[in-house]
Amino acid sequence: MGPALLAESHEIEATFAAARQRRAQLPAVERLAYDKHMAWLAQAHAHQIEPEGNWRTWLLLAGRGAGKTKCAAEWAWWESWRDPGSRTLVTAPTLGDIRDTCFEGESGLLNCIPHQLIRDHNRSLSEIVLVNGSLIKGIPASEPERFRGGQWHRVWADELAAWTYDEDAWQMIMFALRLGKNPRMVATTTPKPKQLIRQLVARSGKDVTITRATSMSNMANLAPTFRDQIMAMEGTVIFRQEALGELISPEESGIVRRSHFRLWPHDKPLPQFELVILSLDTAFTEATMDKRSGDTDPTACTVWGLFYYEKRNNVMLLDCWDARLGMPDLLRRTKREMSISYGDDGDTALIKPLFGNSKPLTSGRKPDILLIEDKGSGISLRQMLEREGLEAYAYNPGRADKLTRLHIVSPIFARRMVWLPESSKHPGQPRNWIDPLLHQLCSYTGPNSIKHDDYVDSTTQALRLMMDKRLLDAVQAKKDEPPKPPPKALSNPYAA
């Protein structure tokens, strides 16, 4: 060993000797806590070590069994011990999850904290009080209002992607995370493509630090059969999400895919439409249309044109918009939309959203049917329209929920019967005003899968009406069956 290495070796040994001396001088209870924490750091994986930097939120995105719970429990109790008299919040999807996983689970707090450091554990209140006066309190994310009034030095948020009211709960927690000089949160979860998770990922490198890990990272601490079970699903989307901890694009798991849609060339005149339906999904009540709130549900409108092409009926999206409108504004907007014409005028394709026309066009086809769901403000809107001489078709979905309705019309998309106008600036892509609708349709997998799903309702009720009237066939016709002719154009037999 050279002189330089020898000197360095002596320096390291001196450092360890000083650390051992300081440890020996600690009170017994402090020494116990120190030893337990050092033992954890000695066995922890790299993804379980607190990241460096001035982060506010540490987001641990990892597969099943990667050691997320153990990591957060060890962090939470040690920080509580280092900061006597502090307050730590532990939250999870339900009260049962807090009790059975975060507190009493195999990797939970009670199995991480040396029992000599615990002054009291109140199971019914989900509270742990350490001998240094620090409180660790559990409150379920299923009750966001319970976060009001409390204030905390730090938070452990477990299985964030499984929270039912994730955004409401997160906002309430942020208001309460206000004690000490550097209040922080550790959020542990197997990722799902929920809006809150995507927002946090987008903030990476700012106030959010992200650590990733797979199920295989902690395989030595899991049952031998677990690897065989999860590897049997290798190559599937669920494997990528649940084992590899990937944040899957929400559109990958949707019922409708972007590949299901066809593009109508931008330089090709639009077809002659046999029927045009304007479909409205109105906000449920007047109160939900408050413009001051960014979380209210908007009214969504889609316009669909039925046309005969390639020996079958097809449907094209002609317009879509959403807006938070009070009833008088919604009434005026609906009347104006019903006066717009869609279709062709000789060699010129006329379609309102493509050219931003605000006045009625002289040719093409105006909406034949105004479709409004028979509920909430939709009932009031229909009544007001009738007084204005404009009759609306009341759509009643019966007991079918949103997901069921989308499943019912999904064969229309799968058979590639739905067309979108192509962008003139970006060949091979739909017009940019269509993207919000596409994202909703392709991302919707059930309640709470996306923040707003109004385009889903507006679309499904229009296509369902066409299916019910036998204008669109969800089942592929047999080869020996002749194609059905297009429906006759609607006309007024009493017109002059």
Image: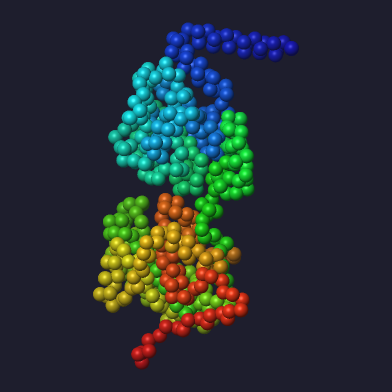
Residue closest to the eye, 10 or 116:
116
Residue shown at 57%/32% (left/top)?
222
Which x, y percent locates residue 260? 56, 64
Which x, y percent locates residue 70? 50, 29
View extreme (right): residue: 1
Which x, y percent locates residue 337? 38, 72
Tell me: residue 135, above or below residue 97: above
Residue shown at 31%/63% (left/top)?
375
Which x, y percent locates residue 288? 31, 56
Tell me if residue 343 can be seen.
no
Question: Dividing the picture into quarters, in which one does residue 101 lie?
Answer: top left
Question: Dividing the picture into quarters, in which one does residue 140 lie?
Answer: top left
View extreme (front): residue: 225
Quadrant containing the N terminus in the rendered view: top right
Q: Is residue 381 left or right of residue 54?
A: left
Residue closest to the eye, 364 or 251:
251
Tell me if residue 120 can be seen.
yes
How many dots with numbers? Answer: 0
Residue shown at 29%/62% (left/top)?
376
Residue closest to the eye, 63 or 279:
63
Residue closest to the eye, 261 or 228:
228
